[in-house]
Structures are given as structure tokens and as C-alpha cells.
Image: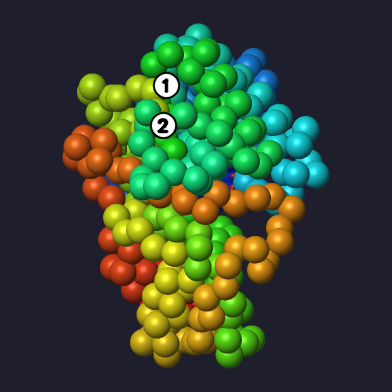
Amino acid sequence: MSLLVLGRNGQLATDLQQAAQQRGMACTALGRAEIDIGDVNQLLRAINVTKPSALINASGYTNVDGAESEGELAFKLNEAAPRAMAEAAAQAKLPFLHVSTDQVFDGTKQGAYTEEDKPNPINLYGRSKLGGEIAVQDHHPDALIVRVSWVWGPSGDNFVKKLLQWASARDELSIVADQIGRPTYSPALANALIDLAAMPNRPKGLLNYAGGDVMSRADQARRVLDASRAHGGPYAIVKDVPTSAFPTPAKRPLNAELAIDKVNALGVPTADFETELRDCIASLLQGKIS
Ligand SMILES: NC(=O)c1ccc[n+]([C@@H]2O[C@H](COP(=O)([O-])OP(=O)(O)OC[C@H]3O[C@@H](n4cnc5c(N)ncnc54)[C@H](OP(=O)(O)O)[C@@H]3O)[C@@H](O)[C@H]2O)c1
């Protein structure tokens, strides 16, 4: 098993490289400095040189608010580039795993979103990611599209790291209590993608992957800050506020909960928030991770 990963310095791209290394697996990761991810010929050349057993797309335009004013770039990276990757992988007869988001949904459903639910994005980021899903399915019918939510971990920029920074500067934080979802640990997601890539009967089409626990953003913040305090790190009181108290350029789906029954039935482990949180917070507070 060897991997070609698109994206190099991003959160998931970094954790994929680490997971591959821990598993003794060859892995080449190409970021924007090394490849134009929207160019089929460059992608085919990279595939020919590295001869991977699977291609994983860990790249994307991920600034949800920024997408509202940078729509062209969001569609270029989230729709056109995955289309080129799917085309190249199909030509090379290579398995392709693409990562998408809960934000293809409008968040109005009561209960968890399954793979069968109809998307209805409410922001431009979600529309560009849905465009990517459709383009990938059109050009690589065997591709696996893994929808994830609320990704956090030791690499890259994420809500957990921001909370620790905010709590270092303030005694009380106002956090939205009416957005619910499943925090998803990026190293666990990386391992899940590798497990899925390695499956002899790899599923195709849409598959949700997310952490084991459902919570609001405010509850997530309380758990993070409690864990931080237990390790001698920064702490702040969390005050529940509604989403309407924080107007943002992009609307957020209030319900981001993805159903994980299908991925669990495949035997792919989903991470427990408290355990991963404790490990990650300890490393963060010891300054082991950026
Ligand atoms: N973070 C979340 O909460 C979340 C939730 C749902 C879904 N997702 C999806 O998960 C995937 C990975 O997200 P992430 O959190 O790892 O994102 P991230 O940390 O923002 O990383 C983005 C990656 O995209 C690449 N990229 C950005 N602009 C580029 C450009 N102009 N040309 C080429 N490459 C470019 C970066 O390449 P370099 O390595 O060169 O910097 C980087 O590796 C994305 O598809 C995202 O939509 C994320």
C-alpha cells in the first residue's frame, strides 16, 4: 500500500503523512508549491512517478466565511480540482478518496444526516463542496467520497486550538449553543481514510465519517477547557449564546450531525472525543505541537 496525497501542509494532509509513516507506508504529499491540483496532466505525471495504490484528496478551499467573497477560488479548489483528480485517477485506474463536508446540508433536519439525505447547501462553501462531490462521481464512479464534520487535532488551525488561545486571554467566552455536530479527530480521520483505501471491497459513493459523540459548540468548548484546566492549561467560563448573536458572512447549518452507522458497520473505528481530547490537550500544553 502506498499513498499519493493532494495537500501537504494542511490539517488532514499532515495527519495523513504521519499516519502513513506510523504504519510504515510510503506516502507522497503534494501541496500547492509542488503541483497544480486542477491540472490533469500534472496529476497523471505525479501518479506515474509515485505509482501509488490510492489517491487521497486532502486539499480544498476551507475558509467558510472567505468563500462568500472568494467564490471563484472556492469553486476552483473544491469543484474543478477534484474533477481533474477524479479524471486523472480514473484514467490511471487508481482508487480515489475525496473528502467532503456536512455543510452540503442545510442543517434543518431533526436527527442525523445519512448518506441518503438530499443535500441543500446554505452557503457558498457548501455549494462548492457539493459541486466537487458531483464532479467526482461523474468522472470516477468507483470513487469514495467521505463526508466529515468539525475536524480538529494537533495539526493545522481548528476550533479547539482557537479555544485555548481565547481562554488564555479572557475569563469568559461566549460560544454558540444551538449548533450541534460531531467533533472529528483529524488523526483518526487520517487512519480511517487509510483503512478504507486498503479495503479489498472498498465502498464507493458517499460515506459519512465523524467522531463518536454529538454535542453543541458550547458543550465542546466546556469539555476542552475542563480538560485544559485539568492539565494546568488555560480555562474560561463558557456562556451559551445563539448563532444569531454572531452574524458571520456565511450561514452555518445548525444541525451538522452526520450518521455514522454505515462506517461503523464497515468496522472502521470512530474516535471517542474525551480520550483524544485528553491526549491532544496534554501535547498542546507541553508545547509538542504547533
Ligand atoms: N476542517 C474542518 O472542520 C472540515 C470539516 C468538513 C470537511 N473538511 C474538508 O476536509 C478537507 C481537509 O481539510 P483541512 O481541515 O485539512 O483543511 P486545511 O487545513 O485548510 O488544508 C487545506 C489544504 O488545501 C490545500 N490548498 C489550499 N489552497 C490551495 C491552493 N490554492 N492550491 C492547492 N492546494 C491548496 C493546502 O495545501 P498546502 O499543503 O500547500 O498548504 C492544504 O493542504 C477539505 O476538503 C475540507 O473541505 C474540513
Q: Secondary structure at mark 1?
A: loop
Task: Tell me which image quadrant ligand 1 sits in.
Answer: top right
Write the residue at 44% across / 64% down: 216
Write the residue at 67% across / 66% down: 246
Residue 154 on image: x %, y %: 47, 63
* Quadrant assignment for the N terminus: top left
- Using the image as rendered, state which of residue 90 and residue 41 is in the foreground: 90
Q: Residue furthest top?
A: 91
With respect to residue 284, does 60 lie above or below?
Answer: above
The residue wearing badge 2 is 117
- Using the image as rendered, state which of residue 176 and residue 48 is in the foreground: 176
**Dot 1 alpha-carbon crowd within 10 angstroms: few under 14, some 14 to 19, many 20 or more:** many
Lateral position of residue 77 relative to residue 140, left or right? right
Residue 251 on image: x %, y %: 65, 50
Residue 13 on image: x %, y %: 51, 45
**Dot 2 alpha-carbon crowd within 10 angstroms: few under 14, some 14 to 19, many 20 or more:** few
The residue wearing badge 1 is 143
Which of pointers 2 and 1 lies earlier in the amino acid sequence?
Answer: 2
CA distance for labels 2 and 1? 19 Å
* Mark closer to the observer (2, 1): 2
Image quarter of residue 193: top left
Q: Secondary structure at mark 2?
A: loop
Three-letter code, disc 1: Ala
Q: Is mark 2 within 8 Å of ligand 1?
A: no
Residue 27 in sight in this render: no
